[in-house]
């Protein structure tokens, strides 16, 4: 049972499987290898640390390509990198993609590069050093001369994916995403949405990034509204508060937008894990026509604004029973979010009537949860549970709207 109101071209047959890969004899596999299909062309370079501020200020290095995470190192973590350089501990290479002649995207290593740049600018003092605790509190310019000269002699290695790796923009994006996924398979674990953002970038992913900064979504999920930049990346000091918010830093806010769109599809598609389902939906939805994406963007904003106007910042809290007493679970939940967003998106033609009854809907919401507690008490995401919650909440809204006949 898909949504009653879907936009033209929105429905996706996610049950279609890729064709089975046929076996090839060794001679054809050898031919494919000789032709260089799916082979990365690279070169290596070494940069003196003292040259990095000038390089990054040249305009030839793009520091925020679309697949970067929203994470910024703490001063302690920056300091540990500098301590490693003082001790001559090997530092992993950065990865660059040459998107134009002698112009590069930073695929991996943004934090290392920006830390070195900031240290040379005396933008932070060393903190939390253990092996060189004598340097705590020092900036670059206040280091002893020998230590400063030692740092200046260090190099940062890079691996550069050359422009000739890809024959066109589409192939370049696919290869960059492939490399990003492989080089990030170890180290700090990516969240599902961080991986999605890197590996399945495209128009729908860009739309989700933009909509994740919509004020009504931020307010209902306890995320600082911050600036309304297109991709929501906080470059200014005034937006540093965003980076303290887990939902923002780990891109859960972007996943919330994606799941709204994905859950408008037929629930039978959700038989696989949610992670796989969202991955597959995003891959397919990235092919949507720009006009459809614009309609979906308007649909999301209208829906979340309506939910916020009716239920306020606590829109996605659950009324639950604990130790024999009923009270609000004082944080938003995806169970409430998925259900309420779907129900309201299906009733936007009745928006004015819903707003007329917003006080009654808000007042009766606790009673609704008490009457249907078994359906909302867990995080069940199988199709039957999803459909049941949608129908129950839809009946609740429709029942209140029918009371309009006075």
Image (spheres, rainbow, N blue to C red):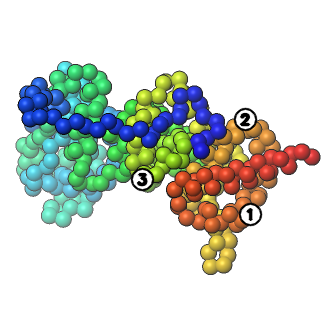
Looking at the rendered image, the disc whose residue lies closer to the viewer, 2 or 3, is 3
The residue tagged 1 is 367
Foreground of the two, 229 or 322: 322
Instruction: From the top left corner, tell me how far across and down residue 37 is, in percent.
Output: 16, 29
Can residue 371 be spotted in the picture? Answer: yes
N-term-proximal mark, 2 vs 3: 3
Q: Is residue 208 left or right of residue 56?
A: right
For the N terminus, the image quarter is top right
Secondary structure under badge 2? helix
The residue tagged 3 is 273
Query: In this figure, what is the number of numbered marks?
Result: 3
Q: Residue at x 70, y 66 (%)?
A: 370
- Rounded to the nearest angstrom, the CA distance separating label 2 from label 3 is 33 Å
- Rounded to the nearest angstrom, the CA distance separating label 2 from label 1 is 26 Å
For residue 349, the mark is 2
Instruction: From the top left corner, tell me how far across and down residue 405 is, in percent.
Output: 89, 45
């Amino acid at each position: 049972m898909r949504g009653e109101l879907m936009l033209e071209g929105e429905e996706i047959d996610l049950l279609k499987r890729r064709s089975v890969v046929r076996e090839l004899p060794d001679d054809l596999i050898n031919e494919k290898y000789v032709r260089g299909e799916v082979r990365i062309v690279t070169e290596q370079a070494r940069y003196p640390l003292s040259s990095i501020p000038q390089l990054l200020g040249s305009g030839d290095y793009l520091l925020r390509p679309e697949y970067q995470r929203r994470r910024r190192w703490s001063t302690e973590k920056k300091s540990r990198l500098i301590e490693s350089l003082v001790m001559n501990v090997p530092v992993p290479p950065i990865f660059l993609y040459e998107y134009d002649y002698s112009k590069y995207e930073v695929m991996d290593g943004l934090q290392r590069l920006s830390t070195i740049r900031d240290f040379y600018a005396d933008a932070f003092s060393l903190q939390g050093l253990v092996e060189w605790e004598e340097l705590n509190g020092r900036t670059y310019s206040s280091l002893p001369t020998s230590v400063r000269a030692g740092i200046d002699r260090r190099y940062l290695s890079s691996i550069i994916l050359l422009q000739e790796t890809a024959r066109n923009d589409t192939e370049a994006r696919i290869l960059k995403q492939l490399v990003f996924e492989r080089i990030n398979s170890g180290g700090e674990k990516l969240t599902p949405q961080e991986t999605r953002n890197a590996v399945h970038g495209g128009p729908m992913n860009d739309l989700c990034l933009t909509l994740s900064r919509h004020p009504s979504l931020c307010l209902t999920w306890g995320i600082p509204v911050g600036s309304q930049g297109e991709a929501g990346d906080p470059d200014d000091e005034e937006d540093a508060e965003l980076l303290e918010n887990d939902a923002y830093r780990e891109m859960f806010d972007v996943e919330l937008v994606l799941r709204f769109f994905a859950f408008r599809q037929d629930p039978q598609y959700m038989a696989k894990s949610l992670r796989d389902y969202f991955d597959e939906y995003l891959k397919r939805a990235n092919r949507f026509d720009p006009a459809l994406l614009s309609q979906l963007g308007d649909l999301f904003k209208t829906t979340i604004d309506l939910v916020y106007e009716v239920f306020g910042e606590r829109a996605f809290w659950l009324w639950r029973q604990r130790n024999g007493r009923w009270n609000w679970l004082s944080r938003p939940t995806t169970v409430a979010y998925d259900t309420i967003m779907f129900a309201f998106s299906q009733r936007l033609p009745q928006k004015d009537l819903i707003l007329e009854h917003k006080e009654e809907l808000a007042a009766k919401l606790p009673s609704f949860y008490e009457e249907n507690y078994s359906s909302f008490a867990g995080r069940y995401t199988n199709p039957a549970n999803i459909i049941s919650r949608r129908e129950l909440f839809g009946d609740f809204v429709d029942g209140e709207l029918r009371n309009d006949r006075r």
